[in-house]
Image (spheres, rainbow, N blue to C red):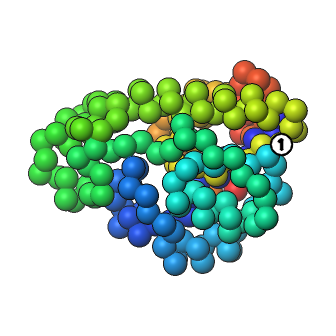
Amino acid sequence: MRIDLIRHGKTVGNTELRYIGSTDEPLAFSGIAELMKIDYPQCGRLFCSPMKRCIQTAELIFPNVEMSICDELRECDFGDFEGKNYIELSMDSRYQRWIDSGGEAAFPNGEDPADFKKRCIEGFLKCIEKAADCEKVTFVVHGGTIMAMLEKFAVPHKCYYDWHIGNGHGYITEFDGKNITVTEKI
Protein backbone atom coordinates (compact mmCIF):
# COMPACT_ATOMS: atom_id res chain seq x y z
CA MET A 1 0.00 0.00 0.00
CA ARG A 2 1.31 3.43 -0.87
CA ILE A 3 0.97 5.92 1.98
CA ASP A 4 1.56 9.66 1.61
CA LEU A 5 2.19 11.52 4.87
CA ILE A 6 1.71 15.30 4.61
CA ARG A 7 2.23 17.85 7.37
CA HIS A 8 -0.26 20.72 7.53
CA GLY A 9 0.65 24.20 6.29
CA LYS A 10 2.07 26.90 8.55
CA THR A 11 0.04 28.63 11.23
CA VAL A 12 0.95 31.92 12.90
CA GLY A 13 2.23 29.88 15.85
CA ASN A 14 4.48 27.87 13.54
CA THR A 15 5.97 31.05 12.06
CA GLU A 16 6.71 32.25 15.61
CA LEU A 17 8.27 28.84 16.54
CA ARG A 18 5.66 28.24 19.23
CA TYR A 19 4.60 24.87 20.63
CA ILE A 20 1.22 24.53 18.94
CA GLY A 21 -0.42 21.21 19.75
CA SER A 22 -3.90 21.36 21.24
CA THR A 23 -4.44 24.99 20.16
CA ASP A 24 -6.78 24.82 17.17
CA GLU A 25 -5.10 27.45 15.00
CA PRO A 26 -6.09 28.01 11.38
CA LEU A 27 -3.51 28.32 8.63
CA ALA A 28 -1.64 31.61 8.27
CA PHE A 29 -1.95 33.48 4.96
CA SER A 30 1.73 32.76 4.33
CA GLY A 31 1.08 29.06 5.01
CA ILE A 32 -1.70 29.00 2.43
CA ALA A 33 0.53 30.69 -0.14
CA GLU A 34 3.32 28.17 0.50
CA LEU A 35 0.94 25.22 0.06
CA MET A 36 -0.13 26.51 -3.35
CA LYS A 37 3.49 26.36 -4.57
CA ILE A 38 4.01 22.67 -3.80
CA ASP A 39 3.23 19.92 -6.30
CA TYR A 40 1.40 17.24 -4.32
CA PRO A 41 0.87 13.68 -5.50
CA GLN A 42 -2.62 12.56 -6.41
CA CYS A 43 -4.66 11.85 -3.29
CA GLY A 44 -5.57 8.37 -2.14
CA ARG A 45 -8.15 7.56 0.55
CA LEU A 46 -7.83 10.68 2.70
CA PHE A 47 -7.47 10.68 6.48
CA CYS A 48 -7.03 13.86 8.47
CA SER A 49 -6.47 15.14 11.99
CA PRO A 50 -9.51 16.96 13.43
CA MET A 51 -7.53 20.19 13.88
CA LYS A 52 -8.41 23.22 11.68
CA ARG A 53 -4.90 23.52 10.26
CA CYS A 54 -5.02 19.95 8.91
CA ILE A 55 -8.56 20.14 7.58
CA GLN A 56 -7.82 23.46 5.83
CA THR A 57 -4.63 22.01 4.33
CA ALA A 58 -6.48 18.96 3.03
CA GLU A 59 -9.28 21.09 1.57
CA LEU A 60 -6.78 23.38 -0.18
CA ILE A 61 -4.52 20.74 -1.71
CA PHE A 62 -7.19 18.09 -2.35
CA PRO A 63 -10.40 20.03 -3.13
CA ASN A 64 -13.52 17.94 -3.55
CA VAL A 65 -11.91 14.85 -1.98
CA GLU A 66 -13.90 13.29 0.83
CA MET A 67 -11.87 13.06 4.03
CA SER A 68 -12.23 10.87 7.09
CA ILE A 69 -11.39 12.54 10.39
CA CYS A 70 -9.41 10.50 12.92
CA ASP A 71 -9.25 12.04 16.38
CA GLU A 72 -6.23 9.96 17.42
CA LEU A 73 -4.12 11.71 14.76
CA ARG A 74 -4.23 15.11 16.49
CA GLU A 75 -1.01 16.75 17.71
CA CYS A 76 0.41 16.37 21.20
CA ASP A 77 -0.98 18.53 24.02
CA PHE A 78 2.03 20.55 25.17
CA GLY A 79 0.32 21.53 28.44
CA ASP A 80 1.95 24.52 30.14
CA PHE A 81 4.31 24.93 27.16
CA GLU A 82 1.40 25.32 24.73
CA GLY A 83 1.53 28.56 22.74
CA LYS A 84 5.01 29.49 23.98
CA ASN A 85 8.33 29.44 22.18
CA TYR A 86 11.75 28.39 23.44
CA ILE A 87 12.71 31.98 24.31
CA GLU A 88 9.64 32.41 26.53
CA LEU A 89 10.37 29.04 28.15
CA SER A 90 14.13 29.47 28.53
CA MET A 91 13.94 30.47 32.21
CA ASP A 92 11.41 27.75 33.12
CA SER A 93 13.17 24.93 35.00
CA ARG A 94 10.45 22.51 33.88
CA TYR A 95 11.31 23.24 30.27
CA GLN A 96 14.99 22.59 30.94
CA ARG A 97 14.08 19.24 32.54
CA TRP A 98 12.06 18.37 29.45
CA ILE A 99 15.00 19.32 27.18
CA ASP A 100 17.40 17.31 29.38
CA SER A 101 15.11 14.27 29.04
CA GLY A 102 15.63 14.32 25.27
CA GLY A 103 11.98 15.25 24.85
CA GLU A 104 10.80 12.08 26.59
CA ALA A 105 9.41 13.60 29.82
CA ALA A 106 5.72 14.42 30.10
CA PHE A 107 4.71 18.00 29.43
CA PRO A 108 3.60 19.74 32.65
CA ASN A 109 -0.21 19.57 32.67
CA GLY A 110 -0.04 18.10 29.17
CA GLU A 111 0.47 14.82 27.40
CA ASP A 112 3.20 12.28 27.98
CA PRO A 113 5.14 11.83 24.71
CA ALA A 114 4.92 8.02 25.03
CA ASP A 115 1.12 8.24 25.34
CA PHE A 116 0.99 10.63 22.37
CA LYS A 117 3.00 8.25 20.18
CA LYS A 118 0.85 5.29 21.23
CA ARG A 119 -2.32 7.24 20.38
CA CYS A 120 -0.95 8.19 16.94
CA ILE A 121 0.03 4.59 16.15
CA GLU A 122 -3.43 3.35 17.19
CA GLY A 123 -5.03 6.00 14.94
CA PHE A 124 -2.77 5.10 12.03
CA LEU A 125 -3.59 1.40 12.32
CA LYS A 126 -7.32 2.16 12.65
CA CYS A 127 -7.19 4.18 9.41
CA ILE A 128 -5.18 1.52 7.58
CA GLU A 129 -7.73 -1.09 8.62
CA LYS A 130 -10.54 1.07 7.21
CA ALA A 131 -8.58 1.46 3.95
CA ALA A 132 -7.50 -2.17 3.65
CA ASP A 133 -8.93 -2.41 0.13
CA CYS A 134 -7.14 0.74 -1.08
CA GLU A 135 -3.86 0.85 -2.97
CA LYS A 136 -3.13 4.40 -1.85
CA VAL A 137 -3.82 6.28 1.38
CA THR A 138 -3.08 9.93 2.15
CA PHE A 139 -2.73 11.41 5.63
CA VAL A 140 -2.82 15.18 6.30
CA VAL A 141 -1.66 15.45 9.87
CA HIS A 142 0.89 17.05 12.19
CA GLY A 143 4.66 16.88 12.24
CA GLY A 144 4.64 14.99 15.54
CA THR A 145 2.09 12.52 14.22
CA ILE A 146 4.23 11.77 11.17
CA MET A 147 7.31 11.44 13.36
CA ALA A 148 5.50 8.96 15.64
CA MET A 149 4.34 6.84 12.68
CA LEU A 150 7.76 6.70 11.07
CA GLU A 151 9.64 6.11 14.32
CA LYS A 152 7.46 3.04 14.89
CA PHE A 153 7.27 1.56 11.38
CA ALA A 154 10.01 2.97 9.11
CA VAL A 155 12.94 0.88 7.97
CA PRO A 156 15.72 1.57 8.41
CA HIS A 157 14.78 2.66 11.93
CA LYS A 158 15.48 6.26 12.93
CA CYS A 159 14.72 8.18 16.10
CA TYR A 160 11.55 10.28 16.44
CA TYR A 161 13.24 13.65 15.88
CA ASP A 162 15.09 12.40 12.79
CA TRP A 163 11.75 12.34 10.96
CA HIS A 164 11.00 16.07 11.37
CA ILE A 165 9.54 17.57 8.20
CA GLY A 166 8.64 21.16 7.32
CA ASN A 167 5.11 22.52 7.10
CA GLY A 168 3.32 21.52 3.92
CA HIS A 169 5.86 18.80 3.16
CA GLY A 170 5.93 15.10 3.83
CA TYR A 171 6.93 11.64 2.72
CA ILE A 172 5.81 9.22 0.03
CA THR A 173 6.07 5.70 1.43
CA GLU A 174 5.26 2.05 0.87
CA PHE A 175 3.68 0.04 3.70
CA ASP A 176 3.77 -3.76 3.61
CA GLY A 177 1.54 -4.20 6.65
CA LYS A 178 4.53 -4.30 8.97
CA ASN A 179 7.14 -1.80 7.79
CA ILE A 180 7.13 1.58 6.07
CA THR A 181 9.76 2.34 3.45
CA VAL A 182 10.18 6.01 2.58
CA THR A 183 10.60 6.38 -1.18
CA GLU A 184 10.76 10.17 -1.50
CA LYS A 185 10.03 13.50 0.15
CA ILE A 186 7.26 15.87 -0.87
The residue most toward the top is: 178
- Residue 77 appears left or right of 182: left
**On the rendered structure, is 128 left or right of 44?**
left
- The structure residue drawn at horizontal position 16% and vertical position 39%, both measured from the top left corner, is 94
Q: Secondary structure at mark 1?
A: strand
Front in this rendered view, residue 44 or 105? 44
Q: Is residue 136 left or right of residue 6?
A: right
* Quadrant placement of the N terminus: top right
Asked whether 55 or 149 is in front, the reply is: 55
In the image, is residue 129 above or below residue 22? above
Q: Residue at x 81, y 49 (%)?
A: 44
Pick whichever, 170 or 53, lies toward us: 53
Which residue lies at the image location 52% right of the left edge and 78% below the top edge? 29
Can you say whether 63 is above or below 182 in the image? below
Q: Is residue 132 left or right of residue 110?
A: right
Q: Which of the 4 image quadrants contains residue 133?
A: top right
Q: Position of residue 65 (x, y in %)?
A: 78, 59
Front position in the image: 183 or 35: 35
Within 10 Å of disc 1 (Cα), the crowding (few <14, some 14-19, many 20+) is some
The picture places residue 159, in percent across and down from the top left corner, at 50, 32
Instruction: Tell me if residue 177 comes above or below residue 169 in the rendering.
Output: above
Identify the image quadrant of residue 64. Answer: bottom right
Say which quadrant the C terminus sits in: bottom right
The residue pinned by badge 1 equals 136
In the rendered image, residue 97, in percent from the top left (x then y), is placed at: 19, 35
Q: How many numbered marks have been drawn onto this rendered protein structure?
A: 1
- Which residue is drawn at the image coordinates 79% and 35% (left, top)? 131
Occupied quadrant, residue 39: bottom right
Can the viewer see residue 184? no
**Is residue 82 among the parts visible in the rendering?**
yes
Q: Amino acid at mark 1?
A: Lys
